Amino acid sequence: MSLAESLLVSGFSMTLVFFVLVALFLLIVIFSKVFGKTKAGSEQGSIQGTDTPAQPVNLSKSPSGQDMSVGTLQLKKVDEKTAAMIMAIVSHESEVPLSELRFKSIKLIEENN
Amino acid sequence: MFIDALKTIWFDSGFAALTWQHLVMIGVACVLIYLAIVKKFEPLLLLTIAFGVLLANLPLANLMKEEIDSETGGLLYYLYLGVKKGIYPSLIFMGVGAMTDFGPLISRPSSLLMGAAAQFGIFMAFTIANLLGFTPQEASSIGIIGGADGPTAIYTTARLAPHLLSAIAIAAYSYMALIPIIQPPLMRLLTTKEERKVKMEQLREVSKLEKICFPIVVTIFCVLLLPSVAPLIGMLMLGNLFRESGVVERLSDTAQNALMNIVTIFLGVTVGATAKAENFLRLETLAIIALGLVAFAFSTVGGLLIGKLMYKLSGGKINPLIGSAGVSAVPMAARVSQVEGQKANPSNFLLMHAMGPNVAGVIGSAVAAGILMALFG
């Protein structure tokens, strides 16, 4: 195969790879929007955030309960976002799915100098 | 009499049939075993491949002997049929699908662009291999090393250039293990410190319904467009549907663990067993290893360049380091993005963001393989 033919095949193939993945990109965008609207309609007003520290949070009531840890979690001087990050890190590092872990409490440890 | 008996035993043994080529291949096998056990280079596959190399190069063992007429073939010959017929790579893809969370990709579908750009190395290596005198089938198989996806490389090579299978499989898995060494210099070379520091916004939550629909939509679209990728994409998405449906826990578990482990043993040993001295000890093996590195490097560059483009277009919201994860190698390439991102900014957590391009790369390399098989198969 000559250089020109090789470049032609490579260019064509790379374009086709892009075409397929861009088409998938558009498909995902479309179905995400469709499902997003469906979900928003059915769950409107059902989710309430809690920013108050040291308040029990029932994670099993999370909208994506399947991937979540179960049970009641005590957050002490830790916001929910940080707690979620800690739980995800523990799950990743221990290689145990979040659904199989049970967190009882997450609290901020203040150093006494 | 006794001496004659000893002579017969000696001449019937493999020792008498040993050649220097066999000894070199036994040495290669021992080096690969060392790399797998001591250096932990992709040990699951490299160890089994290495032992396959060892078994195939012990003369008179005839483990890869073909079945001729009524004469029974060797054990590994029968197991090798799973590679030859494309069964093992497809089953491995099912396990990969069952282990993969496509959530980060669904959450940020633009990751697919990085997964596409990171296939650039495949076609760069394909072009160079053609120039070096390889046939288009061989060049396609060599190029696919740049997809950084072992099963795809084996599947494509078994179909297009089976005589190169051992060299390509060993190169692919060795380079995948070397990703933490190959990618970081390119990442630092092609990005500025400002770009590497970028902290990305949290990914949106992906609903269960989206995760269930994803494998179905991808299968329908990809297989209709490129029927040649059906075994790989079909099995990948079937495994993922097992995982996401939540109703076939046992099947998902089997695909991820028992089946995956069994197939890994068969695949590794038989691919290694194709590395017979007469096939492997050639100059073209060195060329394949060099071209594999070229393919890997250009795939990384392709991902990084589109990452930089997306950084510009998004107004600095996308860290271009995640682009290099577009080469498949799940999750090693994503981990490299995380490590490099954290070096530039210790509070940076890129892992989940990099998983999007990473799993997009699996789809991208399967699509690239499908195109090459459709063109040259």
Image (cartoon, coloured by chain):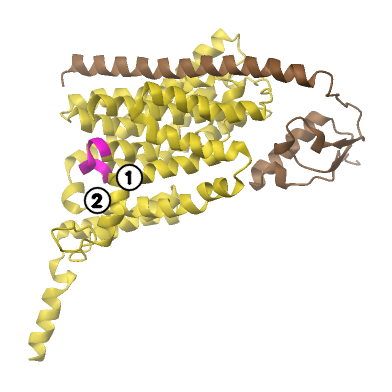
Chain colours: A brown, B yellow
Q: Is residue B149 left or right of residue B346?
A: left
Give the mark nearer the N terminus: 2 vs 1: 1
In the figure, residue B108 lies in which quadrant?
Answer: top right
Can you see residue B279? yes
Q: Is residue B24 magenta?
A: no
Residue type marked 2? Ala
Q: x, y percentage for residue B139?
A: 23, 30
Q: x, y percentage for residue B104?
A: 60, 27
Q: Secondary structure at mark 1?
A: helix
Q: x, y percentage for residue B357?
A: 52, 26
Residue at x-position 80% and y-position 18%: A44
Q: Disc 1 designates what residue?
A: B170
Compared with B258, B218 (above or below) is above
Compared with A87, B356 (above or below) is above
Residue type marked 1? Ile
Placement of the C terminus of chain B among the 4 image quadrants = top left
Q: Disc 2 designates what residue?
A: B275
Residue at x-position 30% and y-position 15%: A12
Q: x, y percentage for residue B351?
A: 60, 31
Mark 1 belongs to chain = B
Q: Is residue B164 magenta?
A: yes
Residue at x-position 37% and y-position 54%: B266
- Where does the magenta region start and end? B159-166
Measure how far apart labels 2 and 1 are at the Cα level: 9 Å
Residue at x-position 31% and y-position 23%: B123
Q: Foreground residue, A18 or B56? A: A18
Tell me, yes or no, whether the two marked residues, 2 and 1, touch with CB atoms within 8 Å.
Answer: yes
Q: Is residue B100 left or right of residue A58?
A: left
Q: Foreground residue, B115 or B376? A: B376
Can you see residue B27? no
**For mark 2, does the 10 Å Cα neighbourhood hold few (<14), some (14 to 19), or many (20 or more) residues?**
many
Q: Chief secondary structure of the magenta span?
A: helix
